Amino acid sequence: MNNNIKFLKKELCIKTSGQFLYEITNKINDWLIKENIHQGHLVVFILHTSASLIIQENASQDVLEDINKFFSKLVPENNYLYTHTIEGIDDMPAHIKSLLTQTSITIPIQNNQMHLGTWQGIFLFEHRKSSFDRKIILSFIGNIINQKEK
């Protein structure tokens, strides 16, 4: 196997349609397969301050709904609580929800796949009510299998 370290970068655009958790695991896996990524580290980074990234259970839709409900109660949409209200009732709460979660996740890559737990998936957590095109950057550093080595 080629022991040269490589760096790859990709931008994903994910269309959201309201406050929810959108699983992006398969989109990331598709890119790993396409690029013949073998072993290293992948950083997933979202280019927004009103959406975030989380690793969460992907086996039960109920978990995702409960998380969304919890965050809605934890950070209420009430303009009387906030100074920043010009972009809508959901904007400042979206910034706070993003602050409480993550804008980037680092995932080990081993044997051409993300090394995740059995029920783990990667989710874009949309905190706004409207539809958005969210940009996510995938940055990989590690070993890539050349076509000749397969």
Image (cartoon, grey):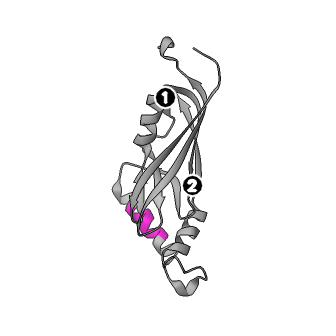
Residue 97, above or below 7: below
- Indicate the position of residue 16 as horizontal and vertical percent values: 40, 59
Q: Amino acid at mark 2?
A: Leu
Q: Which residue is mark 1?
A: 35
Q: Amino acid at mark 1?
A: Glu
- Indicate the position of residue 89 as horizontal and vertical percent values: 48, 79
- Indicate the position of residue 76 as horizontal and vertical percent values: 50, 78
* CA gap, disc 2 and disc 1: 22 Å
Q: Which residues are magenta?
A: 65-71
Left or right of residue 25, residue 86 in this image: right
Q: Is residue 68 magenta?
A: yes
Q: Mark 1, residues whose alpha carbon is within 10 Å: few (<14), some, or many (≥20)? A: some
Q: Is residue 111 visible?
A: no
Q: Which residue is mark 2?
A: 47
Residue 53, above or below 83: above
Q: Residue at x 59, y 79 (%)?
A: 84
Q: Is residue 34 magenta?
A: no
